[in-house]
Image: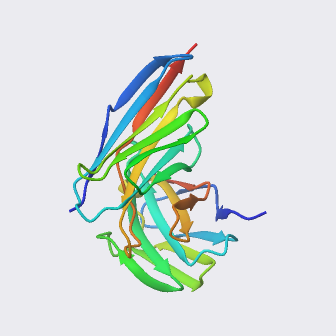
Amino acid sequence: ETAVFQTPNYHVTQVGNEVSFNCKQTLGHDTMYWYKQDSKKLLKIMFSYNNKQLIVNETVPRRFSPQSSDKAHLNLRIKSVEPEDSAVYLCASSSGQGQYFGPGTRLTVL
Amino acid sequence: QQKVQQSPESLIVPEGGMASLNCTSSDRNVDYFWWYRQHSGKSPKMLMSIFSNGEKEEGRFTVHLNKASLHTSLHIRDSQPSDSALYLCAASHTGNYKYVFGAGTRLKVIA
């Protein structure tokens, strides 16, 4: 099956903890993205990688850091989570013809 | 900063009716528009895209684009309850990997 896969589906954690989210795409695309979707469903781009190179780096707090081992994988680490980080984190990939999204990781920070 | 404005914020149409959604970009460099549908609890799925002036039809869905005004619209005829979802518009331009999304239109189709 060709698609965009994300793990975990859900994560509940305490303020100050570190979390990591994984994303893998089997579509053969060169570009991958991380988006944050808040409770109002606003979709904001955070990072984008093209062939393991960071190409889009929006203004996000420094506690967020993306990691890409190859063009099929893009992970997101949050060093010390804050309550405002509670959201759905969506990974997407693209070949330039629109984007394909993963199912998302819902993060809840207590 | 580029903005993508969508209207209306929400829309209720009767089953079998026509739903019309609008989207405008403020960036003169934009040359691609994308429409996505996001059902509750799911992730966005690409519906249609348009790059050229004019109209494109796929089944019950028709997209229009006016490049001069950077305005696109999505029309859903014979709307079904399963069309109830958040519709997101995104804009991008050649050579730019960034897709800018609007805030969406929440469509509800009532039986």
Q: Which residue is drawn at 43% across and 58% down?
A: A36
Q: Residue at x 42, y 60 (%)?
A: A15
- Asked which colour scheme the image uses, the reply is rainbow
Q: Which residue is drawn at 22% across and 61% down?
A: B28
Task: Pick whichever, A107 or B39, lies toward us.
Answer: B39
Task: Pick whichever, B31 or A75, lies toward us.
Answer: B31
Question: Residue A84's spot in the image, x, y percent?
Answer: 36, 55
Question: Residue A25's spot in the image, x, y percent?
Answer: 65, 70
Q: In this view, does B5 lie to the left or right of A10?
A: left
Question: Residue A109's spot in the image, x, y percent?
Answer: 46, 54
The correct choice, above or below, for B15 with respect to A99 in the image is above
Please, which residue is most extreme toward the right here?
A: A1
> Which quadrant holds residue A79?
bottom left
Please, which residue is most extreme toward the front here?
A: B54
Q: Is residue A32 left or right of residue B8?
A: right
Q: Residue at x 67, y 63 (%)?
A: A5
Question: Residue B89's spot in the image, x, y percent?
Answer: 40, 48
> Which quadrant holds residue B9?
top left
The correct choice, above or below, for A62 with respect to B71 in the image is below
Can the viewer see residue A82? no
- Could you tell me which quadrant the N terminus of chain A lies in? bottom right
Task: Pick whichever, B70 or A2, lies toward us.
Answer: B70
Can the viewer see residue A1? yes
Number of numbered discs visible in the structure rendering:
0
Task: Pick whichever, B82 or A17, lies toward us.
Answer: B82
The correct choice, above or below, for A41 with respect to A34 in the image is above
